[in-house]
Amino acid sequence: MKLRLLAFAVLWLAFPVVCSAQRTRIISAAEGARSITVITEPNAIVWVDEIRRGTTDSHGTLSSVTLTPGAHTLRVRADRFKESSSPIAATQRGEIRVRLMRTTEEAELLFQQAEAARETARDDAARQNAAGLYRRTLKIRSAFPAAHVGLARVLLELNDTNGGLAEVDAARHVRPVYPEASAVEGRIYRETGQTDDAIGAFNRAIREAHGFQPEAHVGIGRVYEDKGQYELAAREFAIAIKQLSDTEPVIYQMLGAAYEKSGNRAEAITAYENYLRLAPNGSLAPAVKSIVDQLKSERPED
């Protein structure tokens, strides 16, 4: 099959993965899957196992959060409230109420501003603003590993890889076992062409997270993609998709591209169609639909 260059650039957004509260959720059909409804403050951000799963509505509700079998960790943050983290039992389902306590702690409030600024930054000036907020946070509370990792992500986007690695080291000094820090380290090494170090960091992130680290699996997939090992890349993207329970359509696009480049036309079409199923109005949708139409029009021997 004749390979084509995609007509768009794939965006590998910084994890934790962002899932819009308005996005239509597709419930996983995996055996043993269950769902919960989180009830807390309005416009609160909800993570499960450090994967961002959405934002509560104006009534403080986020429904249909799909969970894979086993125990999980729920983390909730709202502006001007202290962040909360709590376990989810292996059999728990239905409503989970999370009471957040208001805070006036300056470091916590600055950190919340920094996170919001990073997630909405679209140019270097905005990223520099986010970096400044993280630095102000760390000046008040130096032992703040999440702030170090957030700053590392911003510095990576600003192409300051040495600064990013320094922040990863600072985060790990406070929290030696820190899967997210290891995943970010892997991304920095990949960006600087240090492939072996990147794979080592991504694998450490997976070990530290006891196997559940979709950012690291995507990272390994990207390394394989760089090497032209598209079947191996597809395997890693598929693992990340399974762990994310269909909350990140862009990884289906990555999977489709890997299958397409490996000559697996049928699987490429399926992956691309899953992207369109989850994000019919997404920024990549027109290009993906065009690729699907072209793949379907090709003869199998092409």
Image: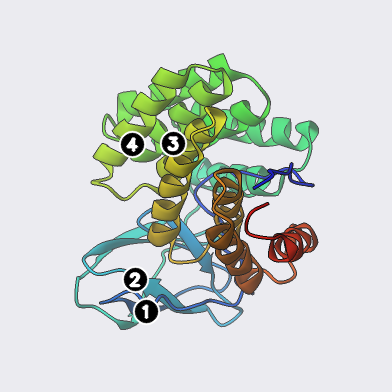
**Which residue in the protein does label 2 denote?**
67
The secondary element bearing badge 4 is classed as helix
Type of amino acid under label 3:
Ile
Badge nearest the viewer, 2 or 1: 2
Q: Is residue 8 left or right of residue 228?
A: right
Q: Are marks 2 and 4 in contact (CB under 8 Å)?
A: no
The secondary element bearing badge 2 is classed as strand
| Total tally of numbered discs in the picture | 4
- Badge 1: few (under 14), some or many (20 or more) residues near its Cα, within 10 Å? some
For residue 123, say whether it is visible. Answer: yes
Pick the front one: 253 or 91: 253
The secondary element bearing badge 3 is classed as helix
Instruction: Please give the label number shown on residue 264.
Output: none
- Badge 2: few (under 14), some or many (20 or more) residues near its Cα, within 10 Å? many
Q: Are marks 3 and 2 in contact (CB under 8 Å)?
A: no
Badge nearest the viewer, 1 or 4: 4
Badge nearest the viewer, 3 or 4: 3
Alpha-carbon span between mark 2 and mark 4: 21 Å
- At x 70%, y 49%, the residue is 120
**Which residue in the protein does label 1 denote?**
36
Alpha-carbon span between mark 2 and mark 1: 8 Å
Type of amino acid under label 1:
Ile
- At x 57%, y 48%, the residue is 263
**Which residue in the protein does label 4 denote?**
205
Residue extending farthest front: 301
First in residue order: circle 3 vs circle 4: 4
Q: Are marks 2 and 1 in contact (CB under 8 Å)?
A: yes
Q: Is 182 drawn above or below residue 241 in the view shown?
A: above
The secondary element bearing badge 1 is classed as strand
Q: Are marks 3 and 1 in contact (CB under 8 Å)?
A: no
Type of amino acid under label 2:
Leu
Q: Is residue 192 left or right of residue 76?
A: right
